[in-house]
Image (cartoon, rainbow, N blue to C red):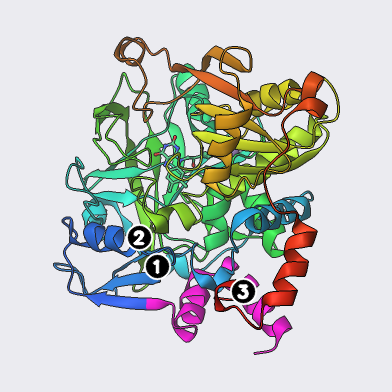
Amino acid sequence: MSGDNVESRRLAALGDLRTCLDLAREMDDLEVVEGADTKMEIGALYELSLERPDPPIIVFDNIKGFPKGFRVAVNVRSSKVFDNGSGLEAVQKYRKHRRKTSAPIPPATVKAGPVLENVMEGAKVNARAFPAPIWHEGDGGHYIGTECMVVTKDPDSDWVNVGTYRVKVEDENTLVPFIEPGKHGDVIRKKYWARGEACPMVISVGQAPVLGAAAASTAAEKVSEYALAGARIGRPIEVVAGKHTGIPFPADAEIVFEGFMPPPDRRSASEGPFGEWPGYYASNSRPEPVLEIKAIYHRNDPIITGAPPVRPTLPGFWFGTAGSGHFRSAAMWDELEAAGVPGVQGVYTLPGGGPRFIRVVSIKQMHAGHAKMAGLVAAGCGSSAYLGRMVIIVDDDIDITNPAEVMWAMATRWDPKTQTDIIDGCWTGYIDPMLLPERREGDDMTNSRIIIYAVRPWHWKDDFPKVNAVSREYADDIRAKWMDKLAFLTK
Ligand SMILES: Cc1cc2nc3c(=O)[nH]c(=O)nc-3n(C[C@H](O)[C@H](O)[C@H](O)COP(=O)(O)O)c2cc1C
Ligand SMILES: [Mn+2]
């Protein structure tokens, strides 16, 4: 394939799940597993695959107790099909895409699509007909939605929101999503409840990779993730309007549930525990509002896209699209610049902190107070407001993609007493293992944050001890001179 051809096929794969699987198969980045059990076995194999930094897409077929063709696919968005790159290069790629998406392309409504190949309504509705895994040993049920889309419409405007929130199968007719307080899906459903109405909702549990990416990203209020996804692939997402709710869902979605979510005082069900990306079962189980299903639509041989969390120390999760936080780093970089912070050289997250807890920003210090400016914005901007813990500001000579370099900056340029801010009352969620029990009980979803200014103090930076390292130029000269003679220089 020529370069252009590869790029156009990548774009096609981004916009279409089945094209993506075909391309992955061609690129030898897809493995099929036959005969696995939804009870823990699929989840365990998935978790083991993440011990590799570059796991293939795994398609589970012939799943125990389900018809052949009813599949579960994992590791889709991290596939080498998408050539996501690594380090700051990957972050910059996301920034480039973000810039391209500045002109959203609204979805196009169509009358038909493969999602309508099979329809279950009335007594035929059966959410248990699909192979929803129990992903981790301690999970409290079969989770059909992990890389999924929960779609709601603002009752006061045209805003259609698409968010990824995990979804448990309660019974044949009922699903239980877990939408953290303050997420757009939560803001919208509460508007219906305030009027005494049930919230119309559709949930897709298998869809184009670009939709999974858009649904998990932090878009602004009133911005439809459908339109952002359309901009990313350069064409409108084709949607059909739900018969019962009018809520649009992708015409080529794999499995879609349509229904209504009554206010929690009318009906709720236990949700959780569920193994979460911080590496714990922090949100435990609690009553959550439910989706009462009116219709299920699915393609022939439908595919559930799965992306359940694992602890953020596993390389495959960390290097993958969800665990690395590269797209959140890209968003923070843009937000810092939009807020007027000059001299930003890089934004990154550190392994072990997952995509959110530990954010590192490198700046080329330009004036007194510059590091403080960067730290305060980085701790408070949209991409870091929820579920943060630490912001570390470092000088531009630090390689922020190397945790040892960040630790070195902290070890040698940081005076804990004078170069630290601790801020209380910030937004966190049920999945934060450090959410204090009394706050959890009292619906006070807040935590504190530390901002560490691990930079040479501005007012004496010129007197700061010089770094002990061979200069880049001299190192290049020496390497060129000795390369042919010394194996250790090239190996
Ligand atoms: C695989 C995956 C699973 C997620 N699960 C949840 C979840 O269960 N509940 C939640 O509130 N957010 C979850 N998120 C984060 C939201 O998708 C994210 O905050 C997104 O911005 C929500 O959309 P919204 O901004 O329109 O509310 C998940 C993200 C990913 C990538
Ligand atoms: Mn949103």
Q: What span is colored magenta in the figure?
A: 1-30
- The reply to whether dot 2 and dot 1 touch (C-beta < 8 Å) is yes
Residue linked to disc 2: 50
For mark 1, give the secondary structure: loop
Q: Does residue 27 appear to the left or right of 479 in the view shown?
A: left
- The answer to whether residue 384 is seen in the rendering is no
| Lower position in the chain sequence, tag 2 or tag 1 | 2
Considering the image in quadrants, where does the N terminus appear? Answer: bottom right
Displayed quadrant of residue 461: top right
Among numbered discs 1 and 3, the one appearing first in the sequence: 3
Residue ID at (64%, 40%): 219
Give the amino acid at mark 1.
Answer: Pro
Give percent across and percent down for residue 446. 46, 16
Q: Position of residue 321 (x, y in %)?
A: 51, 55
Q: Residues within 10 Å of mark 2 (few under 14, many from 20)?
A: many
* Residue type, mark 3 in image: Arg
Q: Of tags 1 and 3, which is closer to the observer?
A: 1
Secondary structure under tag 2 reads loop
Q: Which residue is mark 1?
A: 55
For label 3, the residue is 10
Q: For the residue with label 3, is its CB less than 8 Å from the closest atom of ligand 1?
A: no
